[in-house]
Amino acid sequence: MITLFDSAKKQKLPFIPIKEGEIRLYVCGPTVYDDAHLGHARSSIVFDLWRRLFVFLGYKVTFVKNFTDIDDKIIKKALDSRTDVSEITAHYIDSYLRDMDSLGVLRADIEPKATEHLPQMCEMIESLLHKGYAYKGENSDIYLSINKDSHYGSLSHRIEDSHTQSRIQNAQDKLEHNDFALWKGYKGENDIAYDSPFGKGRPGWHIECSAMIEKHLAYQNEEFSIDIHAGGADLLFPHHENEASQTRCATGKEIAKYWLHNGFVNINGEKMSKSLGNSFFIKDALKSYDGEILRNYLLGVHYRLALNFNEEDLLQSKKRLDKIYRLKKRAQENTPNPTHNTESIHSLSSPQSLTQEAKKEFLNPLLEALSDDYNISKALSIIEDMLSQSNEILDKHPKDKKQKQLIMANLACVEFLLGLGGKDAHSYFQLGLSDEKKALIEEQINKRQEAKKAKDYVLADSIRDELKSQGIEIMDTPNGTTWEKI
Ligand SMILES: [Zn+2]
């Protein structure tokens, strides 16, 4: 049984899907006007982890994450840089996907864009107008009247946010302060516009998610459109509240049965924000750290808590990843290819062979911890125990092939669930070196081999010492000489 903390009910609830064995999950994606920052990374990793768990447990999961490619900030950037809007959005969508690939975040099943869903948005707005929930203002904007929705506020338990509301333009055109724009009429040459049944203009932000959910995911004859709606805690109000309201008024259904929200990222104790100048891009972090090292760090804090980013913690957490790869390297020595099928990790099909091969004493408590509202601390301590015990077994029985296979199956479960440990263990310990440098090291190792053959042990030892002084350790194994960056 999975339990999860539902943001609307503000409590941990048993998860019961709308249809047995199936999960329809929607995550609000980025507005593509800039490169992805640490907050994007964390949110993506959090819901990637939930998705992997659901799949591992055998659910058929449909995962949708959108790209907001119509927005004030995008239009401003296009005007400022005299570039076409579509060029800007295509550039940042590519950059986002590349960054998320580096972090081991699996691509969504469907990645809809706002610009490709104008008919669905217009249809929903028309329905809201027709049913009397929406009205047209004097300046051709169309608003949803929240007073007509008696359940407005039932998600966030808030109905007002002065900061957010103050940013809405043309507020004087609205009947009520909290009414929000479904459609924005064309404002002239510094704006972009699409044709619609309501005249030229563009959709508001909130309507896109409701329309995309109805098109790609929604159940039609159920109480709820989808099982789980997810996103960052900053989206709870007004974005998710407004999404919920529109869908409720337009379709008569609640948009989601459960709501999941991930916590903020603080940088060295302060909330990360562009205005504070302490936000940083993933592409910059990737220059210093491999994506898997960042992922390993970002997933270590419970998804609902704030994560206080600092480099000391990042380096401390790297020890866990080193341990995983150290064990993988040991277990792979002198063993034939492992029998489990790593293909299923990438195709995200249920890993039945893994669950049969892995040790029940490891896997059962691990799944139990993760199924308890993703209790990552408990899960990581279970993994730490498995790593230590496996090393003890290999100390006693260094050549036991059966044990090595069991260890590899346990590690494959960690890879499937957490997205950690999927690299070749040798290359993990060589991370951070350029191909040029690697070639130079290989050249030195070959020279050392030749020196050894010629019984010139003084030269062989001096090459080893020279490499060591550069932070490179050479290991002679029955399969030849390998090396690691220390
Ligand atoms: Zn959304």
Image: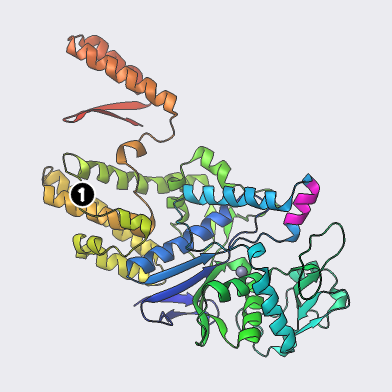
Which of 225/157 is in front? 225
Residue 177 at least partly seen: yes
Instruction: Tell me where residue 186 sits by quadrant.
Output: bottom right
Q: Position of residue 398 (x, y in %)?
A: 13, 43
Q: Secondary structure at mark 1?
A: loop
The residue under the point 63% across, 47% down is 91
Whether 277 is among the magenta residues is no
51 left or right, relative to 360:
right
Number of other residues with Cα within 10 Å of mark 1, as a class: few under 14, some 14 to 19, many 20 or more: some
The residue under the point 81% across, 72% down is 199
Q: Is residue 453 above or below residue 485?
A: above
For the image, the number of numbered tags is: 1
Q: Position of residue 40 (x, y in %)?
A: 57, 56
Instruction: Tell me where residue 154 sits by quadrant.
Output: bottom right
Can you tell me which quadrant of the image ligand 1 is in?
bottom right
The amino acid sitting under disc 1 is: Pro
Residue wearing tag 1: 338
215 left or right, relative to 369:
right
Q: Main secondary structure of the magenta part?
A: helix
Q: Is residue 86 above or below residue 58?
A: above
For the record, the magenta segment spans 74-80
Which of 337/192 is in front? 192
The quadrant of the rendering that contains the N terminus is bottom left
Q: Is residue 20 above or below residue 94?
A: below
Residue 268 at least partly seen: no
The quadrant of the rendering that contains the C terminus is top left
Q: Position of residue 361 (x, y in %)?
A: 20, 64
105 left or right, relative to 188:
left
Whether 77 is among the magenta residues is yes
Q: Position of residue 107 (x, y in %)?
A: 47, 57
51 left or right, relative to 88:
left
